[in-house]
Image: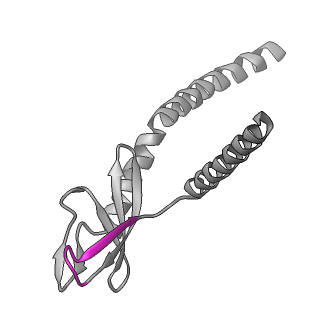
């Protein structure tokens, strides 16, 4: 009968729906933790906690948790953790103390902000010139 079919489909659908919904909530809450664990695990195996410059292994004492990725002889990428993010810097070996040079890699947004600041300075200068000419 139609009512028996409806009861049967509800008895199958309702538990599946609740299991799916609870699984979705659990996965949503734990997704960040799972991704963070996976990233940390991969970082441990793809990077080192020391770098090799001036014929000896070194580390950055000011950034004890920094990790280093070998790029080429005397060149590394330094990944310096800050809360839940990393600052990426270019580390190049040198012949003088402290035997390395650490330069922060600029992102596209850094370049864009720098360009906007220059344009704002030019606009301010032009406006000051125009105003001073009109005042005289």
**Residue at the extreme top of the image, as rendered:** 3
Q: Residue at x 48, y 41 (%)?
A: 31
Q: Is residue 1 visible?
A: no
Q: Residue at x 38, y 62 (%)?
A: 42
- Left or right of 95? Residue 74 is right
Q: 66 or 128, which lies in front?
A: 128
**Residue at the extreme front of the image, as rendered:** 136
Indicate the quadrant containing the N terminus: top left, top right, bottom left or bottom right. Answer: top right
Which x, y percent locates residue 128? 69, 41
Q: 103 or 87, which lies in front?
A: 103
Q: Quadrant of residue 7?
A: top right
Indicate the quadrant containing the C terminus: top left, top right, bottom left or bottom right. Answer: top right
Q: Which region shows up in magenta?
A: 95-103
- Left or right of 19? Residue 59 is left
Location of residue 8 with respect to 90 vertically, above or below: above
Which x, y percent locates residue 116? 65, 50
């Amino acid at each position: 009968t139609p009512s028996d079919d409806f009861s049967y489909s509800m008895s199958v659908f309702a538990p599946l729906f609740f299991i799916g919904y609870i699984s979705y909530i659990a996965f949503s809450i734990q997704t960040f933790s799972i991704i963070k664990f996976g990233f940390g695990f991969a970082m441990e195996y793809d990077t080192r906690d020391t770098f090799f410059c001036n014929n000896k292994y070194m580390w950055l004492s000011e950034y004890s948790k920094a990790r280093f990725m070998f790029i080429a002889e005397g060149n590394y990428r330094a990944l310096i953790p800050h809360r839940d993010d990393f600052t990426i810097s270019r580390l190049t070996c040198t012949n003088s103390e402290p035997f390395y040079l650490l330069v922060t890699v600029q992102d596209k947004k850094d370049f864009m902000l720098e360009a906007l600041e220059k344009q704002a300075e030019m606009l301010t200068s032009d406006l000051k010139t125009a105003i001073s000419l009109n005042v005289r």
